[in-house]
Image (spheres, coloured by chain):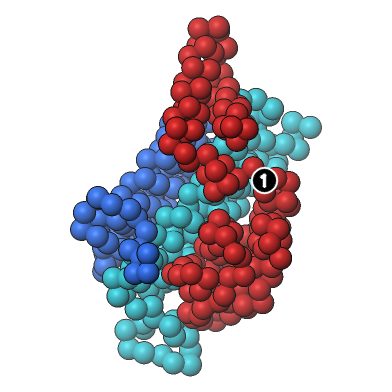
Amino acid sequence: MLKTLSLFLVLMAVWLLLSGIYTPLITGFGVGSCLLSALIAYRMDVVDREGHPLHLGPRIITYWAWLFVEIFKANIDVAKCVLFPQKYLRPSIFTVTASQKSDLGRVIYANSITLTPGTVTVDLDGNQVMVHSMTEVSAEGIKSGDMDRRVTKVMEEA
Amino acid sequence: MELVLDIATWILMLAGSLLLLITGYGLLRLPDLYTRIHAGGMADTLATFLIFIGLALQSGFTLVTAKLLLVLVFVFFTSPTSSYALAQASFVAGLKPKLDGFGPVKKTDDDA
Amino acid sequence: MTIYAIAAIAILVSIALALTRAIIGPTSYDRILSVNAIGTKTVLLIGVMGFLGGRPDFLDLALVYALVNFIGTLAVLKYFKFGTLRGTLSKPRDNA
């Protein structure tokens, strides 16, 4: 029930950001539609730890900051690779093991791999993640397991 | 202050445009589908970020900036999902990645 | 400002390159990749064009376009993978 309330508040915040018109009638419509959406989500039983993961809280913000720096470095790496493929392009496929226990943690890990240019998750089966990487640098980045440890720390499972 | 913001916008958006051009070039140049996905991922992440942050600097603390950031967050959440779906679908369909690229060591005929 | 026009031209050139890949792309997955990339670039283009014309309200359209692009790519991929749009997107599990 608390989750449904926080879902309503998040929906309301997004609605207020997108609307920009704050007359009583329009805002009333907004409150009504957000209430209806929250109620339907509650009835459909989709407001759980996966659907509305507020419990990740501030830890995921620091993770995003770290991930952004990684994305920045990987972009420069891939740009170099596109411009000078003879020198840098070394495609490879390998499998790494995800140490997260929950599905949500694995999805965050696999999506982080895909979001970083130069590495793409090709297949996610159980805790085996098959990764296609473009350069040696990006492959080493995944194989070192740094990102895996950080995601596990975000999920507070280690 | 105004001048500093303008210069920052110029730098950010020029860098974003350059990345977009490299992405388009990569989509044409790279040898197989899986490596082209990497090139497409570049446009989805840093190029989008640079251009939208450049626009956000021009609009200041308004609802427009909030919307820009919302679009940015949305693109960052959805683009890996569709990339993964694409890579997985082509892998399931049996498309084999070309693993030696076009390196100088193992040069094959079709990548001259 | 001039930089908006420069960015818009760069986006258009990039879209043209992606479109070339969509035309010559050997497999249909190459074409889906190009269409997805064109969609992302169109989101950028809508945003920049809004600022170029002094009407940043265009960003609502950019948001909707990002949504439609995502759903459309997934729908096409699902159709290619299963031959139908019914059922779930995930792989059928053997042990479940």
Residue A104 falls in image quadrant: bottom right
> What's the colour of chain A in the image?
red
Q: Quadrant of the C terminus of chain B?
A: bottom left
Query: Could you tell whether C10 is left or right of C93 in the image?
Result: right
Q: How many marks?
A: 1
In the depicted structure, whether residue A13 falls above or below residue B105:
above
Q: Position of residue C29 (x, y in %)?
A: 31, 63
Q: Residue C83: x and y, percent?
A: 20, 58
Picture quarter with the N terminus of chain B: top right
Question: Which chain, by letter, is blue?
Answer: C
Disc 1: which chain? A
Is A43 left or right of A52, judged from the image as shown? left
The hue used for chain B is cyan
Provide residue C86's location: percent of width, then percent of height: 25, 50
Report the front residue among C71 and A138. C71
Q: Residues within 10 Å of mark 1 (few under 14, many from 20)?
A: few
Looking at this rendering, what residue extends furthest in the left direction? C83
